Amino acid sequence: MRVKGELVVIPNESQQFRSILECNELCECQISKCLNRRVQYGPRQKLEVFESPLYKSKGLRTTAYIPSGAFICEYAGELLTLSEAQKRIQIIDENCQMNYILCLYEHSKTRLITIVDPSKRGNIGRYLNHSCQPNCKILPVRTNCPIPKIGIFAKRDILANEELCFHYAGGDNYNGMLNGKPCLCGSTHCNGFIPNTQI
């Protein structure tokens, strides 16, 4: 973290090898003055759910400038086991429903996995759309629990009224399946499909 509590962004760094440890109840710092509790303080102000003309669905945008590395919001929802996630994804696929289930792999795809489903209980994080060239990234953030929260951070400076997007499969080092729904991100680096990773 920087002095102002923002994440230090290292270009082209894989998110799968990076996690954040925030101060917790064992720290001696004053909670009201601590700059290492960004996720615990809740979502950034001036975020707005809107109808995205690009994606033809709801999206999330900022109404104010966000500096590179700043915490935006948590991708919050119901924590799932691997088997429960597989069951839900099968039902979602069979019924052609929207899939909001996010799998966060730490260290490698064979190590730690956190699976979150915000479809029934969640927050504004579920409205971020996918982009093959995103302005946000996701990182595991530990507070008072070994199970991480999924934090969404600015990957670069983001201007007011920009839609917030992240790469649904993690980004730069993605080598999973590209057989999902057609991607509408319009990026010059667009893969043509929203990533459909197998869990």
Image: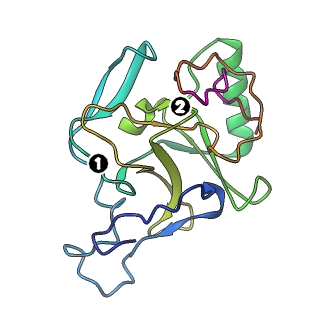
Whether 190 is among the magenta residues is: yes
Residue name at image x 55 percent, y 65 percent: 19
90 sits to left or right of 101: right
78 sits to left or right of 159: right
| Residue of label 2 | 131
90 sits to left or right of 126: right
How many numbered circles are shown? 2
Amino acid bearing label 1: Ile
- Quarter of the N terminus within the rendering: bottom left
Residue farthest along the front direction in this orientation: 188
Q: Which mark is residue 66?
A: 1
Q: Are marks 1 and 2 in contact (CB under 8 Å)?
A: no
Residue name at image x 68 percent, y 37 percent: 85
Confirm whether residue 98 shows in the render: yes
The image position of residue 136, as x and y in percent, is 45, 44
The image position of residue 138, as x and y in percent, is 51, 49
Q: Is residue 71 above or below residue 76?
A: below
Residue farthest along the right direction in this orientation: 110
Q: Residues within 10 Å of mark 2 (few under 14, many from 20)?
A: many
Whether 104 is among the magenta residues is: no
**Helix, strand or loop under label 2:** loop
> In terms of secondary structure, what is the magenta stretch mainly?
loop
Q: Which mark is residue 119?
A: none
Q: Is residue 35 above or below residue 87?
A: below
Q: Residues within 10 Å of mark 1 (few under 14, many from 20)?
A: many
Q: Which residues are magenta?
A: 188-195
Amino acid bearing label 2: Ser
Residue name at image x 37 percent, y 59 percent: 39
Give me the C-alpha separation between circle 1 and circle 2: 18 Å
Q: Earlier in the sequence, mark 1 or mark 2?
A: 1
